[in-house]
Amino acid sequence: MYKRKVQVTGGGTYFVTLPKGWAEGTGVGHGVTVTLIPNEVGTLLLVPEGIRARNRCAIPMDDRDRVHLERDVIARYIAGYDVIEVVGKRIRPEQRRQVRQIAQSLVGVEILEETQEKVVLHSVVNVRDFPVQQSIHRIFDITLAMYNDALAAFLARDEELAQDVIERDGDVDRLVLLVARQFSLLLRDLLVEEEVGLSRFQFLHYHTVADQLERVADHGAKISQAALGLKAPLLESIAKRIQELAAHSREVLVQAVKAFEGRDTTLANQVLSEKEPRGRLLELAQISAADQPENAHSISIVMDSLLRIREYGFNIAEVALDAAVSSPQK
C-alpha cells in the first residue's frame, strides 16, 4: 500500500505522485496516458495504457490427456485470459484436434495460430456483445425445454428424445462458462463494470442464478438417462404422481426466474411460501419406486431430480430478493 499527500497547484488542480517502482513495473513514464475510473463507493482506479494486452498465459502440453487439458483450458478461460497458448516441443496432430474441439466448446474462442510447437487460442468475445441478462434468459429457455422434453421422454420411454436432451446439456454449459468468465473479468478489471453496466455485487446474482440453472439442466439430462434405463412402461398411477410433482417443480422454477428477472419481491415471496417439508415428498418418491420394482432405480432418480429442481427454484427466488435490494431501480 502506498500513501501520498494530495497537493494543489496554483491553478487549483489536485495531483499526487506515482510510486516509482510501480510506474517502472507497468511501463508508465513521461507522456504515457493512464485512465482514471471513479467507483460508486468512492475509490479511484488508475489503469495504465495497454495493460489488457498482457492478459495471456501458457499451458505446457506435456503428457496431458484430453480431460486434463480441457480442465486447464476452461480454468484459464473462466479466469479471464484473452490469449491461451498450449505449448510443447512437438504437439501431435491428435493433440491439436483435441485443442480445437475444446475451443469449439467455449463461446467466442478461436484458433489464432497453430504450429507443431504451439496452438494459440484467442477469446474474441466482448462482454458487451453478450449482455448477462440475455445470457440468463437464453440459459433458462434451453433449460426449461430440456426439462419438459426429459419428462416427456421418461413418461413415453422415448429414447431418441432422451438422447437429444442429453446432447443439449452442452449448450447450457457453454453459456454458463461465458457468464463465469464475465464475472471473473469483472472481479479483475473494474473497466468491465463500465462495459456491462453492472457492479460486481449485482453481477454476482446473475452468476448464482446461472449456476442454479446449470444444475437444473444437469438433472434434465439425468432424467433422460433414467428414461434410457426403464425396463417396462410406467404404471399409470406412478406416471400421474411424477406428472404432478413435475408440474409443481416447473411452476416453482418458472415463477422464481420471473421474480428474478423482474426484481419482483412479492412474487419471490409467493414462490418461497410454497416450501413444504421435504420428508413427505421423499416418502412419496419411495412409495412410487416400491410400486414398480423393475423400474425402481429409474423412478427414484427422476423423483429425486424433480425434488432437487424444486429446491433450485427456491434458491433462485431467494436470489431474487437479494438482487432487488442491490438493483439500481429500487
Image (tube, rainbow, N blue to C red):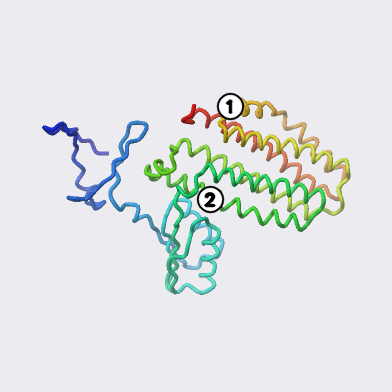
Q: Mark 1 sits on what residue?
A: 265
Residue ID at (65%, 44%): 216
Image height of 146 relative to 317, above or below: below
Crowd rating for badge 2 (residues with CA inside 10 Å; few <14, some 14–19, many 20+): many
223 displayed left or right of 288: left
Residue shown at the point (51%, 44%) measured from the top left: 132
The spot of residue 123 in percent (x, y) is 45, 57
How far apart marks 1 and 2 lie (CA) works out to 28 Å
Residue 106 position in % (x across, y down): 53, 57
163 over 317 or under it: above or below: below
The residue singled out by tag 2 in the image is 177
Mark 1–mark 2 CB contact (< 8 Å): no
- 291 or 272: nearer the viewer: 272
> Which percent across, then down, holds residue 305?
71, 43
Q: Is residue 47 left or right of residue 177?
A: left
Q: Amino acid at mark 2?
A: Leu
Q: Among all residues in the image, which is located at the extreme left?
A: 10
Amino acid type of the residue that numbered disc 1 sits on in the rendered structure: Thr
Q: Is residue 232 left or right of residue 87?
A: right
Which quarter of the figure has residue 17?
top left
Q: Residue at x 72, y 41 (%)?
A: 306
- In front of the other: label 1 or label 2? 1
Image quarter in which the N terminus is found: top left
Of callouts 1 and 2, which one flags the residue occurring earlier in the amino acid sequence? Answer: 2
